[in-house]
């Protein structure tokens, strides 16, 4: 019997491929969770980790979007090396386009919740069963008709899979917790990668160098921005960027201390935003 390997809330699996799906980069979280080494993975097709419970139609849909230079999100079940364990992720995939050509496709994967897995698994089981007697194009059409019958688009389906515990105070910033967490894990991962590569001129101390910081700045003149919890969100976010800057520029022996502080402060920021979630006495429309 296969065993599920659960990701932690802070895990971020990152990999990059060329437009043919050949792996050219994986981060340490990928090797730790998949139990493959970098030597096992580099130069191999990304489907080395594909689980048979994944419908081919989903990958066809994903690649159609990526090759059309569009980002796409998908829930994916992957095998661990040895194929005795598996893990679920929510994957956010981006094509990098230079001079109108795709040079790289990068996927950022975070933990999928039990609610998301239970819902998407039902759909995937039906598609896999359908694919036993139909080709992948027919299966994709079947999936599209399924969505149409439920008056859903693919993106609406993905959005509906967010369980209530993931949702932040949407009235505050129209931000959900998974989006904010993913954005900052990706941001952190990029900084770690630059540090590993020896870049010296890393400047992330300004909180407006990320999308969340820019959004905060754009609404600081609103009446609700005087609320003490909103001010605490700003304060913590500023502090996170200072700590990331210290991580990027400090001696290797103390870098981990700054990253631990980043995690602590992100958790504290989440807690405040969750407290705001059900508070209806403020008009936070943006």
Image (cartoon, helix red, strand yellow):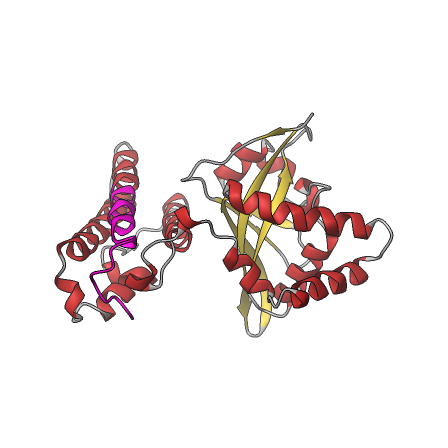
Image side of residue 159 versus residue 249, left or right: right
Q: Between residues 188 and 143, which one lies in front from this camera angle?
A: 143
Q: Write down the quadrant of residue 253 in the picture.
A: top left
Q: Quadrant of the N terminus?
A: top right
Q: Write down the quadrant of residue 20 in the picture.
A: bottom right
* Residue 263 visible here: yes
Q: Which residues are magenta?
A: 265-286
* Residue 210 visible here: no
Image side of residue 255 versus residue 77, left or right: left
Residue occupying the point 23% across, 55% down: 205
Q: Between residues 129 and 102, which one lies in front from this camera angle?
A: 129
Specify whether residue 255 is painted magenta: no
Residue 191 to residue 105: above or below: above
Residue occupying the point 34% across, 60% down: 170
Residue at the limit of the structure toward the top, as seen here: 1
Q: Position of residue 200 (x, y in %)?
A: 31, 51
Residue 5 to residue 94: above or below: above
Residue at the limit of the structure toward the right, as seen here: 133
Q: Position of residue 177 (x, y in %)?
A: 38, 52
Q: Position of residue 111 (x, y in %)?
A: 49, 42
Q: Between residues 26 and 253, which one lies in front from this camera angle?
A: 26
Residue 270 to residue 230: above or below: above
Specify whether residue 274 is painted magenta: yes
Q: Position of residue 265 (x, y in %)?
A: 25, 43
Q: Quadrant of the C terminus?
A: bottom left
Residue occupying the point 63% across, 64% down: 150
């Amino acid at each position: 019997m296969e065993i599920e390997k659960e990701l932690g809330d802070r895990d971020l699996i990152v990999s990059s491929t060329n437009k043919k799906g050949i792996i050219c980069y994986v981060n340490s979280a990928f090797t730790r969770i998949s139990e493959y080494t970098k030597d096992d993975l580099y130069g191999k097709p990304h489907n080395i980790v594909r689980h048979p419970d994944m419908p081919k139609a989903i990958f066809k849909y994903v690649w159609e979007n990526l090759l059309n230079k569009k980002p796409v999100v998908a829930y994916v079940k992957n095998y661990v090396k040895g194929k005795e364990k598996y893990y679920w992720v929510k994957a956010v995939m981006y094509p990098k386009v230079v001079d109108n050509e795709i040079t790289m496709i990068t996927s950022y994967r975070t933990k999928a919740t039990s609610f998301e897995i239970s819902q998407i698994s039902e759909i995937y089981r039906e598609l896999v069963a359908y694919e036993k007697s139909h080709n992948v194009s027919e299966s994709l059409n079947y999936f599209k008709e399924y969505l149409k019958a439920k008056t859903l688009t693919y993106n609406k389906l993905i959005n509906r899979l967010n369980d209530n515990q993931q949702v932040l105070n949407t009235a505050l910033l129209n931000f959900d917790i998974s989006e904010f967490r993913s954005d900052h894990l990706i941001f952190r991962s990029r900084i770690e990668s630059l540090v590993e590569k020896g870049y010296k001129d890393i400047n992330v101390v300004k909180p407006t160098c990320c999308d969340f910081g820019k959004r905060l700045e754009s609404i600081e003149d609103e009446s609700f921005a005087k609320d003490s919890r909103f001010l605490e969100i700003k304060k913590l976010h500023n502090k996170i960027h200072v700590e990331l800057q210290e991580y990027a520029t400090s001696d290797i022996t103390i870098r981990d201390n700054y990253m631990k502080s980043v995690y602590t402060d992100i958790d504290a920021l989440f807690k405040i935003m969750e407290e705001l979630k059900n508070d209806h006495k403020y008009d936070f429309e943006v």
